[in-house]
Amino acid sequence: MKSINDTALDAFLGLIAEKAFAAVALRDVAEAAGVGMADLYRVYPDKVSLVAAFMARLDAEVLAGTPTRNDPEETARDRLFDVMMRRYDALRPHRAALGAIRRAGTRDPMLALAMGPALRRSMAAMLEAASVPSDGLSGALRQNGLLAIHYAVSRVFDRDETTDLSKTMAALDSRLKMAERWAQFFDKYTKSPKSEDPTPSENSPAQ
């Protein structure tokens, strides 16, 4: 038997896919889920919390498919490509709901701002699944970069009717390659000569 959380989230996704994000109220979700408003409010006090739960559900599904060990032959870009494609596979049944959420965020800057933390947490989870650090300032930059890639690729994903999501794969691969080139360029011109290990001197503690 489904929990209230899952029942309400499924109802919410179905409603926004059928109507629109702005056209759905919490009362509509409660009615569709067959639960009382007080029970719904206890687990999901607003629609942003429902979106966050949707992101967390996707994260869990993607992370469940993450290998316990990395293939030493794979690059970080290879691993991130695999992780993000698992995400798009998981998103397939919810394509209409995802589009409704994205359109609502585009039209309402305050809503986009409110959904930002959940989206960045998702991107951090995807980076960690690919063994790419997501903490600190550099991690925050990676999260935002992956979010920008995800937003661009999602527009292709929305219209990709191929059985193997080949158009989505091509768009993701292209943008990840571009991000990799920029990262290499950045590393090349920001790496300090002092970061290289100097030859130990006579008095060096390394002796």
Image: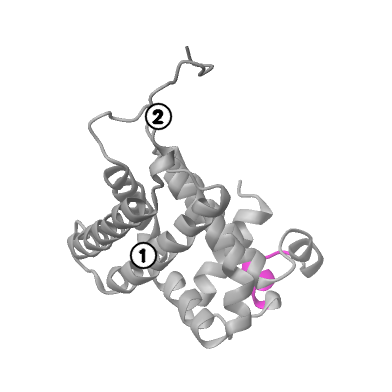
Pick out the residue farthest to the right: 38
Residue 198 vertical position relative to residue 205 in the rendered view, above or below: below
The residue tagged 1 is: 149
Q: Main secondary structure of the magenta part?
A: helix
Q: Which residues are magenta?
A: 28-35
Pick out the residue farthest to the front: 202
Kindly identify which numbered label has been placed on residue 166.
Answer: none
The residue tagged 2 is: 198
* 35 sits to left or right of 72: right
Residue 26 vertical position relative to residue 190 in the rendered view, above or below: below
What amino acid is at disc 1? Ile
* 177 sits to left or right of 206: left
x, y percent for residue 100 = 47, 78
Q: Quote the CA–CA distance across marks 2 and 1.
A: 38 Å
Pick out the residue farthest to the top: 207
SS type, badge 2: loop
How many residues crowd around disc 1 within 10 Å: few (fewer than 14), some, or many (20 or more)? some
**In the image, residue 30 lies in the stretch drawn in magenta:** yes
- Name the residue: 65% across, 50% down: 3
**Quarter of image, res 49:** bottom right
**183 and 102: which is toward the camera:** 183
What amino acid is at disc 2? Pro
